[in-house]
Image: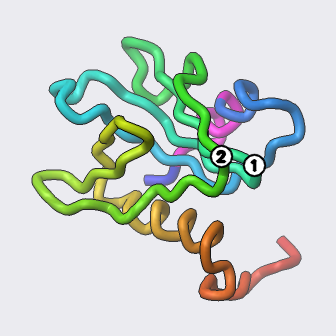
Amino acid sequence: MPVTAAVRERCRSLLPPGEELHYVFPVTLVGSGGVAHYIVVVTGLSVTVMATKVFSHNEPAVVWARYPRRTRLGPVRPGEGPTIRLGDTVFEVDDEYVAVVGAADTEAFSPGDLPKDPLPDL
């Protein structure tokens, strides 16, 4: 399920002015027993990890880490749950967001491989 417009707007409010959201997806800290939730926000300038509120894993509360946009998110590592590594931290990604991780990396490292926008005027 895509991240809601309300969550995207809250993420946008935690970013520096002028940064445009390209990709947003939730992750869980590996080894936390599924209780430490974060949201990864990819913009044209950065990869930002936002910690969520304790009782609302869909509501970002604070910027937890920031990486340059040239930070590779993948490859997604298979296992009990697919994982990505950002810095020294490993996060689990829901299966439905694995394609988002791939698209974000493709945009940064081989943009010629992305399909053309079928509806560029929307």
Element type where label 1 sits in the image: loop
Residue 38 place in picture, x, y as percent: 43, 31
Q: Identify the residue under disc 1.
A: 45
- Closer to the camera in the image, 31 or 10: 31
Residue at position x 54%, y 66% from top? 105
Tell me which label, 1 or 2, sits earlier in the chain. 1
Identified by mark 1, the residue type is Leu
Cα–Cα span, label 1 and label 2:
7 Å
Identified by mark 2, the residue type is Pro
Which contiguous range is marked in magenta?
3-10
Residue at position x 46%, y 15% from top? 53
Element type where label 2 sits in the image: strand
Q: Identify the residue under disc 2.
A: 68
Q: Is residue 2 left or right of residue 80?
A: right
Q: Is residue 96 left or right of residue 2?
A: left
- The answer to whether residue 60 is magenta is no
- Closer to the camera in the image, 4 or 22: 22
Q: Are marks 1 and 2 in contact (CB under 8 Å)?
A: yes
How many numbered circles does the render carry?
A: 2
- The picture quadrant where one finds residue 122 is bottom right
Residue 12 place in picture, x, y as percent: 73, 34
Residue at position x 65%, y 32% from top? 11
